Each structure stands twice: as C-alpha cells, then as structure tokens.
Image (cartoon, helix red, strand yellow):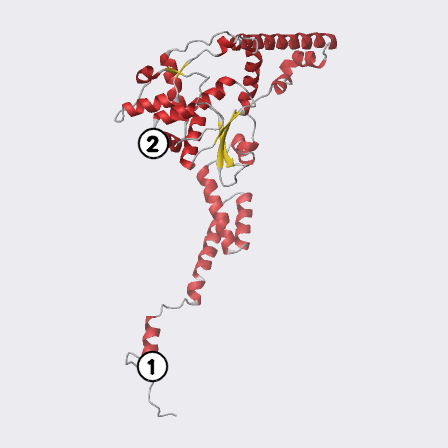
C-alpha cells in the first residue's frame, strides 16, 4: 500500500496539495497569549484605579467588578456610563423613575379630595353634619323642578304635533335637507337609483310617503319586487327617508324574496304620539300636502343636468306635492 497512486481531485489536483492550500488560507488561531491579553489589560486597569484615591463606595464597586464575570461586568459598566451621561437626579426625578405616568401623582383633584384639604375644614364639617330635614326639603324641591321642566317639554311637543296644518318649509331649507339625505344614502344604492327611470322611482316612492304620513308605529310596507336590482333601489329609498329595510324569503313562496320597510326603533314612540294627537284633528287637516323634495325630484334634477352638479337653487323648481291618497300606493306593489 506504500506505493499507491495519490488521490486525484475532480479539478486534477492531488488531495495533499488541496489540504496544504486549505491550511495556508485558514485564519490564524488565537493563541493563549492573545486570549489572556484582555484579562491582563483589565488587571492593569484595576490596579491603576485602585491605587488612586477613591471613595469607599467606588472601592467596593471595583471589588465587586473584579469578582464577577466578563458579561456581567460589561452590563454594569454600560449602566454606569449611562448614569454618568444623565447627570445627577433630583428627588422629583428619582420619584418619577419609580412612579411612571399612569402611577404617578394624579393631576385631577376631585371635589372630595379638595374638601379634605386642611384649609377646607369648614366645608368638610358642613358636609359631615347634614341637617336631614333640610336635605329632604332640598331633594323635594329639586324633584318638583324636574317634573315641571318635563311637563313643559311634553306640552311643547304636543302643541307642535297637534298643529292643524304643517308649517311651510322654505325651498332653500327643504333643498338642503333633501341633498343631505341623498348624501347619507349608500353609494351602491345611489348608483342603482340613477340607473332607474325617475318616473318608476316616483311611483315606488309613493308607498314610502304613504307610510311616513300614516304615522302608524306598527305599520310596515311589503314590496314584492322582481330581482335584486329593484330590491337595492327599495333599500336606497328606505335610507333616503330614514326607514329600516330588509329582504327575506316569502312565506307563500320560499323561492321569492320580499322587501319589508319598517319604522326605526327610535321613531316608533314619536309616531305613536302623533297618531294619538291626530285622532282629534279633522281629516281635512290630516290630508294637507307638504312641499317636500323627494328622491325622484333629485333624480329628475340629475337627469336634467347630467354634466353638472345640483345645488339647492336647482332643486327649488322640483318641489312637488305628493298626495297620501294615491291609487298606486298599495301593499302589493309589483314593479313592471
């Protein structure tokens, strides 16, 4: 085996030559002398600092640093460097370190804390020694005042709702309210309403106006529409008039879906009061038409000005009165 041929590497060099080149290119190993150089340097620095006149606290700190390991010594020295850079701390600064923002002194002083101060001893004594008869009289007067204010508010609301004829709204104000309701309608619903014919929307909107002016809190409007596009238009009209709407499967035909329009929960009580008050109002006064800008009016204005926007001045000429006794307004409405 002594005379075997040398191992040849794929590149044509021998294995011996490859190992020799690898050892030549390898980084030099750290000798024991290099490894102990830092320790010797720390020893020399420690002896130099110890020879200088220092306080007992610094001497004890140096003794502690000499005994601990290298990593812990580095952490302690880094902390000391940060303390030296920060400078001396005052008593308030030290207290702030141990009492950060949410746990420090509260800037808000409650009335009870203010009353507990020594200079407010007279107020605290009045608070502790209360005359129960005087307290009862004060509470009774306060309750009577609240009842009187509530009675005046209810009477004012009753007078407003029981007026024989509704107040005429200025065209500018009505146009502003209509544009605000149009802006509150969802974007998808507005796009669906724009794609429809204003005449068809006006015919469908009569049902909503009839429901609103009827004032029945338990009343609802059931619409049997053809497809989801027309149901989206119905939801848009409900948003425009501030009503709630949802679609569900029909009880008679599960394959068909119907749209139900109802009053919002917050407006049911107001509608009920209006119905009670309107029972004493003549029928002729109940059927008074109001100048109201509807969604169909806005669609007509948009159709008239396709390239430009609309404003209250443009909407003034689209004021129209809608009668609540329309022949088209029925519960079973099918859009053709």
Numbered label attached to residue 34: none
Q: Residues within 10 Å of mark 2 (few under 14, many from 20)?
A: few
Residue located beneath label 1 in the image: 16
**Picture coordinates of residue 50, whole percent (x, y):** 50, 50
Can residue 182 be seen? no
Q: Residue at x 54, y 37 (%)?
A: 252
Say if residue 164 shows up in the picture. Answer: yes
Q: In this picture, is 226 found above or below 7?
A: above
**Residue reaching furthest to the left:** 307
**Lower sequence index among marks 1 and 2:** 1
Toward which corner of the image does residue 95 lie, by quadrant? top right
Question: Which residue appears farthest toward the front when viewing the image?
Answer: 327
What secondary structure is marked by label 1? helix
Q: Element at badge 2?
A: helix
Can you say which quadrant of the picture contains the N terminus?
bottom left
For the C terminus, give its image quadrant: top left
Question: Do the residues under discs 1 and 2 have CB atoms within 8 angstroms?
Answer: no
- Residue 62 lies, in percent from the top left, at 52, 49
- Residue under pointer 2: 195
Name which quarter of the figure residue 181 lies in.
top left
């Amino acid at each position: 085996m002594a005379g075997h041929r040398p191992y040849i590497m794929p590149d044509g060099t021998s294995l011996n030559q490859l190992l020799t080149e690898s050892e030549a290119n390898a980084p030099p190993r750290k000798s024991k002398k290099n490894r102990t150089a830092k320790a010797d340097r720390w020893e020399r620095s420690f002896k130099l600092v110890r020879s200088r006149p220092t306080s007992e606290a610094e001497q004890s700190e140096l003794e502690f640093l000499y005994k601990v390991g290298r990593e812990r010594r580095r952490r302690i020295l880094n902390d000391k460097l940060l303390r030296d850079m920060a400078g001396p701390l005052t008593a308030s600064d030290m207290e702030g370190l141990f009492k950060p923002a949410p746990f420090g002194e509260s800037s808000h002083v409650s009335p009870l804390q203010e009353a507990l101060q020594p200079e407010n001893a007279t107020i605290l004594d009045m608070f502790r020694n209360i005359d129960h008869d005087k307290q009862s009289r004060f509470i009774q007067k306060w309750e009577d005042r609240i009842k009187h204010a509530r009675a005046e508010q209810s009477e004012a609301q009753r007078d407003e709702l029981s007026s024989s004829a509704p107040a005429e709204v200025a065209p500018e104000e009505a146009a502003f309210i209509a544009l605000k309701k149009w802006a509150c309608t969802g974007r998808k619903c507005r796009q669906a309403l724009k794609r429809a014919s204003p005449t068809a929307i006006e015919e469908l909107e009569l049902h909503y106006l009839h429901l609103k002016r009827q004032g029945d809190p338990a009343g609802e409007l059931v619409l049997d529409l053809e497809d989801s596009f027309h149901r989206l238009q119905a939801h848009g009209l409900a948003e425009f008039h501030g009503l709630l709407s949802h679609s569900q499967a029909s009880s008679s035909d599960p394959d068909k879906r119907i749209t139900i329009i109802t009053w919002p929960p917050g407006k049911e009580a107001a509608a009920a009061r209006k119905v009670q008050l309107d029972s004493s109002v003549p029928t002729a006064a109940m059927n008074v038409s109001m100048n109201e800008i509807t969604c169909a009016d806005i669609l007509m204005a948009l159709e008239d000005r396709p390239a430009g926007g609309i404003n209250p001045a443009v909407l003034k000429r689209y004021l129209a009165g809608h009668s609540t006794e329309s022949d088209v307004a029925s519960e079973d409405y099918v859009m053709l």
